[in-house]
Amino acid sequence: MTTTSSSPPSGIVPPSRTQRARAAISARTLRTDRWWVSPLVTAIVLGVFVVYTGVRLFMRNDYWVAEYHYLTPLYSPCLSASCAPGSSHLGTLLPAFPLALPLPILIFPILAGFRASCYYYRKAGYRAFLLSPPGCAVTEPGMRYAGETRFPLILQNLHRYFFYLASALLLINTYDAVLAFFPANGGFGIGLGSLVLLINVAMLWLYSLSCHACRHIFGGRLKHFSKHPIQYWFWTQLSKLNGRHMQFAWTSLITVMLTDFYIMAVAAGWIADLRLFN
């Protein structure tokens, strides 16, 4: 009895004797769908956000509407003596800054660090910018992989500490949203800007509460859920939010930009705030 051997399909290299764990495919991928769309869109959106926020941080104007107490989240809290009068809710703890120094020089690194080290944004950023890998079953261009064990990616392990600091800033953002319902002329008032700030802070809360680090803080170290019923309840609720962490990550990213743009437009006089009450 004789046997015949067929040659492998085009583009596939037969595995060697020392490498039989996975197929050695010379082609970058055998996928026929548009796998490149997702990393491309991710790179565009994140790139727009980085450019937009970079420009806004160095503008140093049109971030505060004194008449309605609208303060953009990109400048909150404003702690420098260079801040616009009335925008420093916590006081001017820092001296005046030179023009080349952004006013939120101490605030934005915390927000950027929290986002950049987020578990979801890690995956999105690695696939969109580092192409590591750009998609499932798609070969990455780099041949060496060290994970997050070397500088600068080892800084991703600081995520939980960025979470603590960002949570403190989120409490201040919440105060800003509440203050936006009490205009300078006194009393209670509702404007489109106050609603925009409220929606934005709600999205930021959902993004933070759905964070993997937040979920771990409440239940990650528990060995017996039955002995900690309150923590277990919080853990289960946070786990439900965690399933939508990607959606909250994108939504909150967009609402931050829209909120800042709206406040800038009102502060610059491009548009007038739509007042619904008072």
Image (cartoon, rainbow, N blue to C red):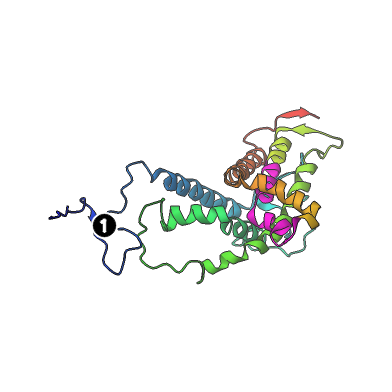
Residue type at the position of mark 1: Ser
Confirm whether residue 195 shows in the render.
yes
| Most common SS among magenta residues | helix
Describe residue 249's horizontal placement relative to residue 227 as left or right.
left
Q: Residue at x 81, y 33 (%)?
A: 189
Q: Is residue 79 magenta?
A: no
Instruction: Tell which residue pokes out farthest to the right in this image.
Output: 187
Viewer-nearest residue: 277 or 111:
111
Describe residue 65's horizontal placement relative to residue 55 as left or right.
right
Q: Which residues are magenta?
A: 200-225
Instruction: Tell which residue pokes out farthest to the bottom in this image.
Output: 150
Q: Is residue 211 magenta?
A: yes
Residue 132: give x, y in percent of width and height. 42, 58
Q: Residue at x 73, y 65 (%)?
A: 95
Q: Residue at x 62, y 58 (%)?
A: 114
Q: Considering only vertical position in the picture, is 128 above or below 96? A: above
Q: Which residue is mark 1?
A: 26
Residue 4: give x, y in percent of width and height. 14, 54
Location of residue 251 by image quarter: top right
Residue 81: give x, y in percent of width and height. 74, 60
Describe residue 2's horizontal placement relative to residue 109 as left or right.
left
Location of residue 277 by image quarter: top right
Instruction: Tell which residue pokes out farthest to the front in this image.
Output: 1
Viewer-nearest residue: 69 or 148:
148
Instruction: Tell which residue pokes out farthest to the left in this image.
Output: 2
Which quadrant: the N terminus? bottom left
Residue 190: give x, y in percent of width and height. 77, 32
Q: Secondary structure at mark 1?
A: loop
Confirm whether residue 89 shows in the render.
no
Q: Residue at x 65, y 60 (%)?
A: 110
Viewer-nearest residue: 114 or 119:
119
